[in-house]
Amino acid sequence: MSFFSFGQSAEIDVVLNDAETRKKVEHKTEDGKKDKYFLFYDGETVSGKVNVTLKNPGKRLEHYGIKIEFVGQIELYYDRGNHHEFVSLVKDLARPGEITQSQSFDFEFTHVEKPYESYTGQNVKLRYFLRATVVRRLNDITKEMDIVVHTLSTYPELNSSIKMEVGIEDCLHIEFEYNKSKYHLKDVIVGKIYFLLVRIKIKHMEIDIIKRETTGTGPSVYHENDTIAKYEIMDGAPVRGESIPIRLFLAGYDLTPTMRDINKKFSVRYYLNLVLIDEEERRYFKQQEITLWRKGDVVRKSMSHQAAIASQRFEGILNGVRLPSRVFKGESS
């Protein structure tokens, strides 16, 4: 654990009680790099120690209180400095006074609600962190420690397939079918494309996975489209009656669960985009929204007991909800 120095008199750090055993996962930072953070789930307790170490033993450190906070917040990059907190818990560790020797302060946030998944996007960031503060007369001294939260869910067995058509009158008629409309992040998209009528010369066909991030409301809405994956279906001209199978493995791509209207600040949606290109470089496309989710059954094997209980509670809510599975769009990526 790295130390954060304040002045020349002391150092402060935050250490989790289960730091030796808790799983770490990679998470993207604002600059596009990936760092490892401790992983938590909704309902898990967050506990540990705040260590204040005096650099010069015997020298007093005066303060106006020591506290630790657990914070969940959303930051919109176009509105920096205006953080929207959806979780804010505070524990007072010490009353105003002075420290004459190094001290450790225990803390515990019991069964903390963590309703949303950690996310770093093009225009928005949702983060959870612990912030230890030594309150002083001129400048508060703080140390923050980020954690990552994953949301787990289970959908009912009923998962309707997607059937769509792409057609140009008297020139092209294609049907394509995907095996379902909701996929977990390690799933496989299985489908088939049927060529019923082909009177134009198609030279290339691919399926793209498009991530669409939407931030803001009203007139201040921003949309960012990002092509996560390109899967080449065909390179060459198809003939009438031909069918082409599709198998697209999601595990190799950087995906998040679908997020809809998170705290009324942003959404993240995913689309399958079928693209056809003819010999004159004209593009034909059809988009279909899919739902992505993080499968709880796999992760729970290595979860703590309290996280498993929280996940089951969350799944019970989801199992009673039927999410819309078919949204037809014809937009360019």
Image (tube, helix red, strand yellow):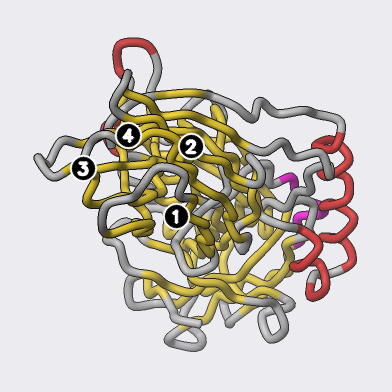
Image quarter where the C terminus lies is: top left
- Given residues 75 and 69, the one toward you in this image is 75
Question: Which labelled disc corresponds to residue 201?
Answer: 3
Residue 190: in sight, yes or no?
yes
First in sequence, mark 4 or 2: give its number. 2
The percent coordinates of residue 47 (x first, y second) are: 74, 66
Three-letter amino acid code at the position of disc 1: Arg
First in sequence, mark 4 or 3: give its number. 3
The percent coordinates of residue 115 (x first, y second) are: 68, 42
How would you rate the neighbour count of disc 4 (Cα within 10 Å): few for under 14, some for 14-19, many for 20 or more?
A: some
- Residue that label 1 marks: 136
Dividing the picture into quadrants, the one containing residue 28 is: bottom left
Answer whether labels 4 and 3 touch (C-beta < 8 Å): no
User: What residue is drawn where x is 89% and y is 40%?
Assistant: 316
Dividing the picture into quadrants, the one containing residue 72 is: top right
Examine the structure image and report whether residue 287 is included in the region drawn in magenta: no
The percent coordinates of residue 249 (x first, y second) are: 53, 64
- Residue that label 4 marks: 285
Question: Which labelled disc corresponds to residue 269?
Answer: 2
The stretch of residues the image draws in magenta is 108-113
Q: Is residue 69 left or right of residue 59?
A: right
First in sequence, mark 1 or 3: give its number. 1
